Image (spheres, coloured by chain):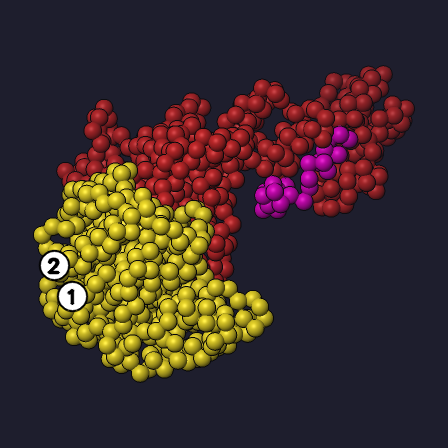
Amino acid sequence: MEWEAVIGLEIHTQLATKSKIFSGAPTAYGAEPNTQACAIDLGLPGVLPVVNAEAVRMAVMFGLAVDATIAPRSVFARKNYFYPDLPKGYQISQYELPVVAHGRLDITLADGSHKRIGITRAHLEEDAGKSLHEDFHGMTGVDLNRAGTPLLEIVSEPDLRSAQEAVAYMKKVHQIVVYLGICDGNLQEGSFRCDANVSVRRKGATAFGTRAEIKNINSFRFVERAIEHEIERQVELLEGGGQVVQETRLYDPDRDETRPMRSKEEANDYRYFPDPDLLPLELDAACVAAARAALPELPDARRARFVEAFGLSPQDAEALTASRPFADYFEALVAAVGGDAKLCANWMMGEFAAALNRAGLDVTASPLGPARLAGVLQRLRDGTLSGKLAKEVFDAVWAGEGDADAVIAARGLRQITDSGAIEAIVAEVIAAHPKQAEQYRAGQEKLFGFFVGQVMKASRGKANPQQVNDLLAARLKG
Amino acid sequence: MHHLTLAELAAGLAAGDFSSRELTETLLNRVQAHDGDLNSFITVCPERALAQADAADARRAAGRAGPLTGLPVAHKDIFCTRGLRTSAGSKMLDAFVAPYDATVVERLDAAGMVLLGKTNMDEFAMGSSNESSHYGPVRNPWDTATVPGGSSGGSAAALAARLVPAATGTDTGGSIRQPAALSGITGLKPTYGRVSRWGMIAYASSLDQGGPMARSAEDCALLLGAMAGFDPRDSTSAQVPVPDYAAALGGELAGLRIGLPREYFGAGLDADVARAVEAAIDEYRRLGATLVEVSLPSTELAIPAYYVIAPSEASSNLARFDGVRYGHRCAAPRDLHDLYTRSRGEGFGAEVKRRIMVGTYALSAGYYDAYYLKAQRIRRLIRDEFLRAFETVDVLMGPTSPSVAFGLGEKADDPIALYLADIYTVAVNLAGLPAISLPCGFKQGLPVGLQIIGRHFDEARLLAVAHRYQQVTDWHRRAPAGYA
């Protein structure tokens, strides 16, 4: 029997504001417990929330980036439940009227085709604190540093049909929020995490199956595996004559399985109602227009422009625009080199990416700015350096030995392009290997490479390879 | 000097007739002498008060005194005071000391007022008899066998007994006006958003409003001028300029159109209270005002709507008192559930628990539409009716409370009877309007209050209208026997 998975994702994006969504306390990650929480975050009596305008602006930017409707009036509501790391006994969120609704984005599938995924809504809310169960000997510690951190919860339509599509969608949302600068995108620190709603149905069926919700998945790899396992579990269950129970499950990456967390039936009645401490959030056209004007070029548009303006292949353009800083670097490099985008692209994706990778650095932490790399590529283009020498120079520049010209001068790496000088070396080499010259002339053409090698060695790698080839060919014939 | 009004004391301080220290010492002695009977204070802070008095005297000597500098005040114990316990009348917060001042506290502090202490109140402002306080009931100085009204009953009783010349209160469904009426003092509930709620412990956020309580409208005007104004820390506070209320007190009433809501003079109103209120209205007619009968047909819906909305918000507002971070925590909790249930079970009194349960029920899935949403629709209806009435009249007048002060314990077992007595006050909160209660007579030695309701942000008119009456009557000057 053929089964089809139906998947929707709820992505919690931590907005990169300096202060919390309803208080002035800082949002920095990794501080000592309870040092980044003020009276408001602690839910002391008499304190009141005031919405952070920057968090609202970021939510609007996201909405615009996914062609969504920005609600002229949205409402903060209270989601009531008791938990030690929820200081007020309720979470301020948006319920009936979210700030962003009816958006969409396109993902690229494995076969290169595109699929449109609907975004039901995106709403602003505050994060809770953290309960710490270890190191407290049968008690629970509470750290409220995270309490009140702004989140944008992005809810997709159930448009995803496989774990791979879900990952592609999650990566796309990640790319957009990082491009917009509204999220640091750090999955390890929990800045970008997701819940997956998964159900299966017979292929061709139109009704949805009963879904399970997998909570708090914080890596692309885990999303794929968690969903795959959940699909398998549900199919096995149904094929065995069983039924899927609507429940919340947790993915355990160590055991590579999902297991039930708590049943929805037992879950809280959250008693949502509009928060009387906050006025409805009203956004006029001018405010939306200002956010629109501040939107950076988004990945899809940038990729298309790279193909168009630089004559790059769609694959190269995709790789170069994967992150905004990488694409920024590329554009700065092309400008500094003064053209030859293809050469720049090859170096960015080749030597440069490899060097970053070796050093474990992000492009933003590169020791080599675009101007320095451009210096190397210019010497390559004007013939001062061969490709091989350019790589040596690149390594030296990366290592901090100065700019390309300084390295070339210090190491004497200037390419030899004087025909007379190369011809002299060629003559010397042939004279030193009469036997091989004879064999070559007798038809052993593969010995040509031997002579090239000898000439390059004699020139300490500096002879222009093309000229070496031409001159060797001419001389050996003689 | 304890019998003088705030305005008279201000003049005395300015003239150098006495110092703030002398005044403060006099009143502290009075509190000590009388409050054992009345129980109007939860906390008295003599050292802090005397230090503030000395600072005020120094400020005056340096020529930097404002109109309120050196004048004593008491805050309802629902306003957070940095370094001084704020209990909200609850065992839950018996040991709570806020690390911040409420905006109202901060502003009166900056004006140079001297804080004598924190006044008793119904627990978390839930009540209208001041019997639900963890610190025991407050007694009405006019007859200590009766209640002073609530929830700001401590402030009202302290004012009536001439222990303080000024106090703050909060009014969610009548908690400033009703005790003002029952204790024979003057109290103003401002427009919702007029006074910042920052640092004021929430009962029902969309209805709560802090305001002045004093012995005259003129004194309320002085206080409100210092308390009111936009506060960026309270998103619901209004960006509406604050007029000079004291300067607006003069003027005649000729041309004033007074609306008399038919529903405010119907069944349930005590005949003697009705007579006193009608006599006051007649006085206004003599002063040149025009009387217009109006109708507010949804008045009877105000109580059920209020007793859905206020408990709903309260059930959520009081969720933070969970024994985890501050407040009462039960001894040796076995687990999380035990910690919650026993801490809250022990920390809250019966009335608070009743309202939390009612509110939780009203917000529950399946009941939300039938209760909360319906109540919100009634709320809009009530507001619209008021606004329509204000198209033809300038103010509305009627009784503040259907009866005078009742006996302590008399209604303790009948919460519904207590709720029904809020009939003339709760609609004002639902509509967000300002209203003032002022003394207008007595029934068997117990004060009767006249309520004047105004348009949104029309406090200046309310104060002027009340002041005009107090210029030609002396009800507000009468003191209970033994406290003159």
> Measured from the top left, where is residue A182 in percent x and y?
49, 41
Horizontal relation, residue B77 to residue B374: left or right: right
Find chain A in the image and tell me its colour: red
Q: What residue type is labelled 1?
A: Lys
> Measured from the top left, where is residue A335 in percent x and y?
69, 28
Magenta stretch, main secondary structure class: helix
Q: Which amino acid does label 2 sit on?
A: Asp
Horizontal relation, residue B438 to residue B443: left or right: right
At 52% from the left edge and 40% from the top edge, which residue is drawn?
A: A181
At 27% from the left edge and 58% from the top edge, which residue is drawn?
A: B437
Magenta run includes residue A376: yes
> Measured from the top left, where is residue B278 in percent x and y?
18, 54
Position of the C terminus of chain B by quadrant: bottom left
Magenta run includes residue B368: no
Return the mark for residue A27: none
Horizontal relation, residue B6 to residue B61: left or right: left
At 77% from the left edge and 40% from the top edge, which residue is drawn?
A: A403
Q: Are marks 1 and 2 in contact (CB under 8 Å)?
A: yes
Q: Mark 2 lies on which chain?
A: B
Colour yellow, chain: B
The answer to whether residue B178 is visible is no
Return the mark for residue B443: 1
Query: What's drawn in magenta, residue-wise?
Result: A355-380
Question: Same chain for the residues at labels 1 and 2, yes or no?
Answer: yes
| Local secondary structure at mark 1 | strand
Q: Give the Cα separation between the discs numbered 1 and 2.
A: 10 Å
